[in-house]
Image (tube, rainbow, N blue to C red):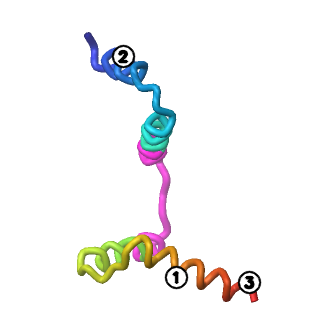
Amino acid sequence: MQLKAKLLHKLSAIDDEATLKEIYDWLEAYLDAESNTTFESDEIQAVTEGYQTYLSGNTISHKQAAIRFDQWTKEKGK
């Protein structure tokens, strides 16, 4: 059996909508990444800085980030 057929067979066995959506979203992101998108140097620099921050361990949890974001949006709404 060819790989593509195996994948389709496996996908046809999945009934969970959330799992299918996750697979679909991943596939979309993968295919979009394959495009010939170009980035400005400041965009590349921002991603590089963010990655270095991540590597240094200077991060916060998802929950902490959500709290900060909520606070920020409330302040912006004033």
| Contact (Cβ within 8 Å) of mark 1 with mark 2 | no
Q: Secondary structure at mark 3?
A: loop
Circle 1 SS class: helix
Which label lies toward us, 1 or 2? 1
- Return the residue nearer the eye: 17 or 48: 17
Amino acid type at image mark 3: Gly
Q: Which residues are magenta?
A: 29-45
| Quarter holding residue 53 | bottom left
Disc 2 element: helix
* Mark 3, residue position: 77
**Residue type pointed to by label 2:** His
Horizontal side of 61 relative to 72 (left or right) equals left
Q: Residue at x 45, y 42 (%)?
A: 22
Q: Earlier in the sequence, mark 3 or mark 2?
A: 2
Q: Which mark is residue 12?
A: none
Residue at x 59% of width, y 84% of height: 71
Per the image, the residue denoted by label 1 is: 68
- Between the C-alphas of marks 1 and 2, the distance is 44 Å
Of the image marks 1 and 2, the number of the one nearer the N terminus = 2
Going by the picture, which residue comes out furthest to the top?
1
- Give the residue at mark 2: 9
- Image point (37%, 74%), residue name: 61
Image coordinates for residue 5, horizontal then vertical, percent: 34, 15
Q: Is residue 59 above or below residue 12?
A: below
Is there a contact, CB below 8 Å, between mark 3 and mark 2?
A: no
Residue 77, position as x, y percentages in the image: 74, 84
Q: Residue at x 36, y 16 (%)?
A: 9
Percent from the top left, x then y, of residue 57? 25, 79
